[in-house]
Amino acid sequence: MYITTPARRPKNPRIKPIQEKSCGIILFREEASTSEDTHTNSKSTHYYLVLHYPGGHWDFAKGHVEANENEEMTALREMREETGIFKVTFMKNFRVAMDYFYRRDRRLYHKDVIYFLGKTSEQKVKLSHEHQGYAWLTYADAMKQLTFENAKSLLKKAEKFLVEK
């Protein structure tokens, strides 16, 4: 699954945004399902890791690409730095690209973000200073907890990918 989500360009064409690129992981773990905790006929329930940022929003782990890193390396490094989770297996053929514009310090930024879907068996999370909380949530609960529509869209794509695999 390779998907790109377009961003809205600013109305003033003279404004040149600063380009950024980040990569992240939609991280999940599986547990055997009970009849009342799943929305599908699957034999397992997916628990997704969502992080609570100091700004108040809930989202997935992501961060800027550093020199000499490829996308997967960046996503893994950010996961390790932000959560202390090291054991991550990427799900083959899941890469979602999205982009958006935002303002910081009165400057306009255009950010490209690449997300991968990763599986882990680790449950323990050691948060970095970048976050104030976390939760392992079922799909339904994560959809309620995530703040931004683009994160909810990513989660829908991830769950669909897992249920159909």
Image (cartoon, rainbow, N blue to C red):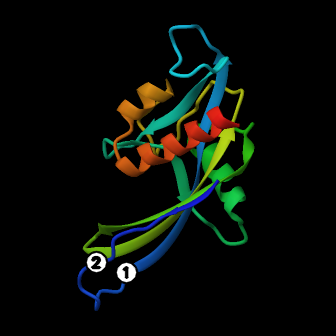
The relative height of residue 118 versus residue 37 in the rendered view (above or below) is: below
**Residue 106 location, x and y as percent?**
25, 74
Mark seen at residue 122: none
Q: Residue at x 53, y 68 (%)?
A: 21
Residue beneath disc 2: 10
Identify the amino acid type marked 1. Answer: Pro
- The quarter of the picture where residue 107 lies is bottom left
Total labels drawn: 2
Q: Nearer the viewer, residue 84 or 76?
A: 76
Q: Horizontal placement of 18 versus 34: left or right?
A: left
- The quarter of the picture where residue 122 lies is top right
The relative height of residue 9 versus residue 117 in the rendered view (above or below) is: below
Residue beneath disc 1: 17
**Residue 12 location, x and y as percent?**
24, 85
| Quarter of the rendering occupied by the C terminus | top right
Identify the amino acid type marked 2. Answer: Pro
Which residue ends up furthest to the top in the rendered image? 35
Disc 2 versus disc 1: nearer the observer = 2
Sequence-wise, which precedes: disc 2 or disc 1? 2
Q: Residue at x 28, y 78 (%)?
A: 10
**Residue 38 location, x and y as percent?**
53, 17
Q: Nearer the viewer, residue 84 or 57?
A: 57
Which residue ends up furthest to the bottom in the rendered image? 14
Q: Horizontal placement of 82 versus 58: left or right?
A: right
Q: Nearer the viewer, residue 136 or 5?
A: 5
Q: Are marks 2 and 1 in contact (CB under 8 Å)?
A: yes
Q: Horizontal placement of 54 versus 51: left or right?
A: left
Near mark 2 (Cα within 10 A), the count class, few <14, some 14-19 or many ≥20, is some
The kind of secondary structure element at disc 1 is: loop
The relative height of residue 1 versus residue 127 in the rendered view (above or below) is: below
The relative height of residue 47 versus residue 86 in the rendered view (above or below) is: above
The kind of secondary structure element at disc 2 is: loop
